[in-house]
Image: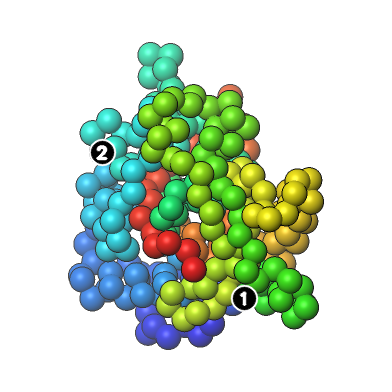
Amino acid sequence: MNIQTARRTKPLMPGFGVEIFDVDIATADQRTLADVVSTFHRHGAIVLRGQTLDQPAQLAFTRLFGEPEDNARKEYCDPAYPQIYVISNKTVNGKPIGDPAAGLGWHTDNSYSKLPALCTMLHALDVPPEGSDTLLSDLCAVWDALPAERQRALDGLVLHHSYVALAEKKKQPLTDELRANYPDVFHPLVRRHPTDGRKALWVSTGTVRGVVGMPNPEGVDLINELVAFATQEQFIYRHKWQVGDVLIWDNRCTLHRGTPFDTVNHIRHVHRTWVRGDAPV
Ligand code: SIN
């Protein structure tokens, strides 16, 4: 992928992601922000450091990418701004104010919905000195690295995603409302990016019950094998957090996970927004 913008940028790793310099999101003009959005659509992920965004400013920036998406787990949403999901191990009066352990397994966001999240934006307000890195796998590079014969065998397979399966595995509360709002869905394993048609091996864990038309354990074994392949070092960008970072990744062509940190002695406080996506093709 070529960087076509005149803005000062640096690839996050060869062929994937861009760090964008000299942009203050809160005060940037519309042209600059449009340039940021267009860079995002071409590169899989972007990072802008040193940002100060309150909740309305983060939501306004999120809207430049599309419609902010709701979260299933209302208990961790900011009460005043429900489309902001709070990832935090802070407590107030002994009660958690956010999700202390979001996204610790490899996944792509909201894949249990008919319209999975187009992108995810994290804004870091407090970070520990070590750990809590966010890892992104470049699923287009993963697809390109597969032999042609394997690509032919995988193209056309469909995965069975399930919010219920995820909640059961994670022992998360499962109400009748959640079951009704999130019926099981079926998405292609190989996904085309709408901007330029590049293909991604759109595999995931957590929500995936199996492969349509393939009995288990064969189906889940295939998924596990593909996730192991997709999460090799050469496909991974590791984001090391600083306060003020904004990291946005494109869920249409990446897999991601959070990593642990010392939650007893340190605080991590991050605001997350999602943008509603299209039906995967
Ligand atoms: C997520 O998967 O939504 C969050 C990942 C992270 O906190 O690093």
Q: Nearer the viewer, residue 237 or 194?
A: 194
Q: Amino acid at mark 2?
A: Tyr
Pointer 2 residue: 81
Of residues 110 and 31, the one nearer the viewer is 110
241 shown above or below 229: above
Name the residue carrying label 1. 14
Q: Nearer the viewer, mark 2 or mark 1?
A: 2
Q: Pointer 1: residues within 10 angstroms few (<14), some, or many (20+)?
A: few
Q: Residue 80: name its quadrant.
A: top left
Instruction: Please name the residue shown 73% across and 71% down the image.
Output: 153
Identify the mark nearer the N-term, 2 or 1.
1
Give how far across and how far down residue 8 sits, in percent. Answer: 41, 77
For residue 156, above or below residue 77: below
- Is residue 55 visible in this depiction of the protein? yes
Q: What colouring does the structure picture have?
A: rainbow
Left or right for 56, reference 134 = left
Q: Position of residue 238 (x, y in %)?
A: 61, 57
Tally of numbered discs: 2
